[in-house]
Image: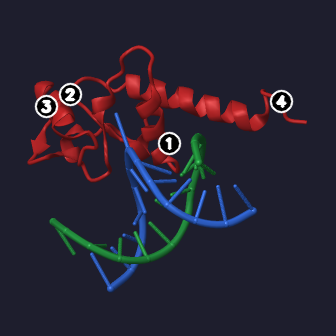
Chain colours: A red, B blue, C green
Amino acid sequence: VPDKFSDLGRRRDARTGRIVAAVRAIPEGFVRTYGDIEPGAPRLVGRVLAGYDGDPIPWHRVVRADGSVTQGPRQLERLRREGVPLRGDRVDLRRARLPPGLR
DNA sequence: AGCGTGACAATTA
DNA sequence: ATAATTGCCACGC
Protein backbone atom coordinates (compact mmCIF):
# COMPACT_ATOMS: atom_id res chain seq x y z
CA VAL A 1 0.00 0.00 0.00
CA PRO A 2 1.54 3.28 -1.14
CA ASP A 3 1.94 5.87 1.60
CA LYS A 4 3.38 9.34 1.38
CA PHE A 5 6.80 7.80 0.76
CA SER A 6 5.67 5.86 -2.27
CA ASP A 7 8.12 5.48 -5.12
CA LEU A 8 6.08 7.81 -7.21
CA GLY A 9 6.07 10.58 -4.67
CA ARG A 10 9.76 10.35 -3.91
CA ARG A 11 10.61 10.33 -7.57
CA ARG A 12 8.67 13.52 -8.13
CA ASP A 13 10.32 15.32 -5.24
CA ALA A 14 13.77 14.21 -6.34
CA ARG A 15 13.10 15.53 -9.79
CA THR A 16 11.91 18.87 -8.47
CA GLY A 17 15.02 19.14 -6.34
CA ARG A 18 17.27 18.36 -9.28
CA ILE A 19 15.57 20.99 -11.35
CA VAL A 20 15.95 23.76 -8.80
CA ALA A 21 19.58 22.82 -8.21
CA ALA A 22 20.30 22.76 -11.92
CA VAL A 23 18.82 26.21 -12.44
CA ARG A 24 20.69 27.63 -9.48
CA ALA A 25 23.92 26.32 -10.97
CA ILE A 26 23.67 28.25 -14.22
CA PRO A 27 26.49 30.81 -14.18
CA GLU A 28 25.93 34.49 -14.96
CA GLY A 29 26.08 35.24 -18.65
CA PHE A 30 24.95 31.79 -19.74
CA VAL A 31 21.66 29.97 -20.26
CA ARG A 32 20.25 26.46 -20.48
CA THR A 33 17.10 25.21 -22.16
CA TYR A 34 14.14 23.55 -20.48
CA GLY A 35 14.96 20.33 -22.27
CA ASP A 36 18.61 20.38 -21.22
CA ILE A 37 17.64 20.70 -17.59
CA GLU A 38 15.14 17.86 -17.57
CA PRO A 39 15.13 15.80 -20.76
CA GLY A 40 11.79 14.21 -21.44
CA ALA A 41 9.88 16.55 -19.15
CA PRO A 42 10.66 20.13 -20.16
CA ARG A 43 7.21 21.30 -19.14
CA LEU A 44 7.87 20.12 -15.63
CA VAL A 45 10.72 22.60 -15.42
CA GLY A 46 8.37 25.45 -16.22
CA ARG A 47 5.89 24.14 -13.71
CA VAL A 48 8.51 24.06 -10.97
CA LEU A 49 9.79 27.53 -11.73
CA ALA A 50 6.28 28.95 -11.85
CA GLY A 51 5.43 27.65 -8.42
CA TYR A 52 8.82 28.11 -6.81
CA ASP A 53 8.71 30.39 -3.77
CA GLY A 54 12.08 29.71 -2.10
CA ASP A 55 15.34 31.64 -2.23
CA PRO A 56 15.84 33.56 -5.47
CA ILE A 57 17.22 31.52 -8.36
CA PRO A 58 18.28 32.72 -11.83
CA TRP A 59 15.08 31.63 -13.56
CA HIS A 60 15.74 34.09 -16.39
CA ARG A 61 18.65 31.92 -17.58
CA VAL A 62 16.25 29.22 -18.69
CA VAL A 63 15.09 29.62 -22.28
CA ARG A 64 13.37 27.61 -25.00
CA ALA A 65 15.26 25.27 -27.31
CA ASP A 66 15.14 27.86 -30.11
CA GLY A 67 16.52 30.65 -27.95
CA SER A 68 13.22 32.46 -27.47
CA VAL A 69 12.19 33.45 -23.96
CA THR A 70 9.02 32.71 -22.03
CA GLN A 71 8.82 35.76 -19.80
CA GLY A 72 8.94 38.53 -22.36
CA PRO A 73 10.76 41.87 -22.01
CA ARG A 74 11.46 41.38 -18.30
CA GLN A 75 13.52 38.32 -19.00
CA LEU A 76 15.24 39.79 -22.04
CA GLU A 77 16.31 42.80 -20.04
CA ARG A 78 17.73 40.66 -17.23
CA LEU A 79 19.71 38.65 -19.78
CA ARG A 80 20.95 41.74 -21.56
CA ARG A 81 22.12 43.20 -18.26
CA GLU A 82 24.41 40.28 -17.60
CA GLY A 83 25.85 40.15 -21.09
CA VAL A 84 24.03 37.19 -22.59
CA PRO A 85 24.42 37.43 -26.39
CA LEU A 86 21.10 38.11 -28.11
CA ARG A 87 20.06 37.99 -31.73
CA GLY A 88 17.01 40.19 -31.88
CA ASP A 89 14.59 38.92 -29.26
CA ARG A 90 16.27 35.55 -28.91
CA VAL A 91 19.32 34.27 -27.10
CA ASP A 92 22.23 33.25 -29.33
CA LEU A 93 22.41 29.70 -28.07
CA ARG A 94 25.57 28.92 -29.98
CA ARG A 95 27.43 31.22 -27.65
CA ALA A 96 25.38 31.26 -24.45
CA ARG A 97 24.14 27.71 -24.03
CA LEU A 98 25.94 25.54 -21.51
CA PRO A 99 26.88 21.98 -22.45
CA PRO A 100 23.62 20.00 -22.20
CA GLY A 101 25.00 17.01 -20.33
CA LEU A 102 26.25 19.05 -17.39
CA ARG A 103 24.80 18.10 -14.05
C1' DA B 1 -11.76 8.16 -16.03
C1' DG B 2 -11.68 11.92 -19.44
C1' DC B 3 -10.31 16.29 -21.06
C1' DG B 4 -8.08 20.75 -21.16
C1' DT B 5 -4.07 23.40 -20.13
C1' DG B 6 0.73 24.96 -19.56
C1' DA B 7 7.45 29.11 -18.25
C1' DC B 8 8.32 22.65 -23.88
C1' DA B 9 10.38 20.00 -27.96
C1' DA B 10 11.45 17.09 -32.09
C1' DT B 11 9.77 16.12 -36.58
C1' DT B 12 7.80 17.13 -40.86
C1' DA B 13 6.06 19.90 -44.59
C1' DA C 1 11.90 30.53 -41.37
C1' DT C 2 7.02 29.51 -39.97
C1' DA C 3 3.24 26.25 -38.98
C1' DA C 4 1.01 22.00 -37.82
C1' DT C 5 1.46 17.53 -35.49
C1' DT C 6 2.58 14.59 -31.93
C1' DG C 7 4.66 13.37 -27.58
C1' DC C 8 5.66 14.62 -22.92
C1' DC C 9 4.75 15.33 -17.33
C1' DA C 10 1.80 16.99 -13.84
C1' DC C 11 -2.65 19.43 -12.28
C1' DG C 12 -7.32 20.46 -11.72
C1' DC C 13 -12.22 20.08 -12.69
Chain letter of disc 3? A
Disc number for residue A44: 1
Tell me the quadrant of the picture where the N terminus of chain A can be found: top right
Residue designated by label 4: A3
Residue A74 lies, with reference to residue A42, above or below; the image says: above
Residue B7 lies, with reference to residue A11, above or below; the image says: below
Residue A15 sits in quarter = top right
For disc 2, the neighbor class at 10 Å (few under 14, some 14 to 19, many from 20) is: some
Residue A90 picture location, percent across and down: 17, 47
Residue A72 lies, with reference to residue A28, above or below; the image says: below
Viewer-nearest residue: A2 or A97: A2
Residue appearing at x 24%, y 23% in the figure:
A28
For disc 3, the neighbor class at 10 Å (few under 14, some 14 to 19, many from 20) is: few
Residue appearing at x 78%, y 27% in the figure:
A5
Circles 1 and 2, Cβ within 8 Å, touching? The answer is no
The answer to whether tags 1 and 2 share a subunit is: yes
